């Protein structure tokens, strides 16, 4: 299907003359017509590259936002687990009681008994009456057996009992100190997590969300301008995507073709090469079969250049986020306003200015060149 350049009647592809007005159908009548089509497709290719760039930035900003939300959720979960751990540590700390070591008590008592016995024998050998007299008095009053039991059994048991009590208290304090240290360490981690959470909730998530919203708005505006450009009715709708537009522009630029429709036109050349597998019809097929599609390498190279530029823009976005986070730390409060990244704003302005210029051009040229 094609349109008469004079009256606008829709003609069949094999019609040489318009059934309505009788004018002969023409692809190119002058050099200026070729220049117009060539420039039109050059602009269309730039528009499609710009569209790809915007959609790529929107995808990257969406990924950054989702990563920030996911990290916020991770930190919140980590904080919750630390609080639960602290609660458990406090309960365990309150239940700390070292069990009585019966064996150590008996062993300590026996050791003291031996020491007392040796001491008493030594004192007796050297006639320390002043020290042995209480023992003799006790033996005379309570009996020798009772005195010996009290001296060598009772006293050691009591002394060892007090010693074991002191040991248990020291062990309890040491165990509680370990719990206190772990709780303090958890609290330091919680404080650090709280700072990170404030950064994410007050700066990072709102900032990425704002940049994504702006990118979506710019993308919507850009698509509106793109549709206005294609409303010139020069390019068939089924070819209004990046790979066909850029490929057919290359045909025109190399003068492989000098027109779009009809025999020898860019449409038929594209369809024929696509059917034979010499070219790809979309980016997925192009990347998958690049080695066999050398004719379209310029598209692939341009896409990789755009991806590199997008990485630079993403780095600029992250630097602006870091600057906002630093401001928030200095102010010790939430930021009232979070400014957009200036480099990204400049990129948007450049794209919109360019596509608006293309629309102004096509509006001025369309009246003179009604080829289809």
Image (cartoon, rainbow, N blue to C red):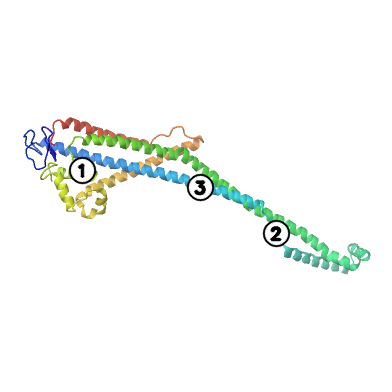
Q: Secondary structure at mark 2?
A: loop
Expressed as whole percent of the image width and height from the top left, the position of residue 160 reads 77, 61
Q: On the rendered structure, is 111 left or right of 352?
A: right
Mark before the other along the chain sequence, 3 or 2: 3
**Label 3: few (<14), some (14–19) or many (≥20) C-alpha neighbours in 10 Å:** few
Residue topped by disc 2:
99
Q: Nearer the viewer, mark 3 or mark 1?
A: 1
**Label 1: few (<14), some (14–19) or many (≥20) C-alpha neighbours in 10 Å:** few
Q: State whether residue 320 appears in this view.
A: no
State how far apart marks 3 and 1 are (Cα). 50 Å
Looking at the image, residue 140 lies above or below residue 174: below
Q: On the rendered structure, is 153 left or right of 174?
A: right
Residue topped by disc 1:
238
Q: On the rendered structure, is 44 left or right of 170?
A: left
Expressed as whole percent of the image width and height from the top left, the position of residue 324 reads 44, 37
Q: Give the label on residue 77, or none.
A: 3
Who's the residue at 53% across and 44% down the image? 192
């Amino acid at each position: 299907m094609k349109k008469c350049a004079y009256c606008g009647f829709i003609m069949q592809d094999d019609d040489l003359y318009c059934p309505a007005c009788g004018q002969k159908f023409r692809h190119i009548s002058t050099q200026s017509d070729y220049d117009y089509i060539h420039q039109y497709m050059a602009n269309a290719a730039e528009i499609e590259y710009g569209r790809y760039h915007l959609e790529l930035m929107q995808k990257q900003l969406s990924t950054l936002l989702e990563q920030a939300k996911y990290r916020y959720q991770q930190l919140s979960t980590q904080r919750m687990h630390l609080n639960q751990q602290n609660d458990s540590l406090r309960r365990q700390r309150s239940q700390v009681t070292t069990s009585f070591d019966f064996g150590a008590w008996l062993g300590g008592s026996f050791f003291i008994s031996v020491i007392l016995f040796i001491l008493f024998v030594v004192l007796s050998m050297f006639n320390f009456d002043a020290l042995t007299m209480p023992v003799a008095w006790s033996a005379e009053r309570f009996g020798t057996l009772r005195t010996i039991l009290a001296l060598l059994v009772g006293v050691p048991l009591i002394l060892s009992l007090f010693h074991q009590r002191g040991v248990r208290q020291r062990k309890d304090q040491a165990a509680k100190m370990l719990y206190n240290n772990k709780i303090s360490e958890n609290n330091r981690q919680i404080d650090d997590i709280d700072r990170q959470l404030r950064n994410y909730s007050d700066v990072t998530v709102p900032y990425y969300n704002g940049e994504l919203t702006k990118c979506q708005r710019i993308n919507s505006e850009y698509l509106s301008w793109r549709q206005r450009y294609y409303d010139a009715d020069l390019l068939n709708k089924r070819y209004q995507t990046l790979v066909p537009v850029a490929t057919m522009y290359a045909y025109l630029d190399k003068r492989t073709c000098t027109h779009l429709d009809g025999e020898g036109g860019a449409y038929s050349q594209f369809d024929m090469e696509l059917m034979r597998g010499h070219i790809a019809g979309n980016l997925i097929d192009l990347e998958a079969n690049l080695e066999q599609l050398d004719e379209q390498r310029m598209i692939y190279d341009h896409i990789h250049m755009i991806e590199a530029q997008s990485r630079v823009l993403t780095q600029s976005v992250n630097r602006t986020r870091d600057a906002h986070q630093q401001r928030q730390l200095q102010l010790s409060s939430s930021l009232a306003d979070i400014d957009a990244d200036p480099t990204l704003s400049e990129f948007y302005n450049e794209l919109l200015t360019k596509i608006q210029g293309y629309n102004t051009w096509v509006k001025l040229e369309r009246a003179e060149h009604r080829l289809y």
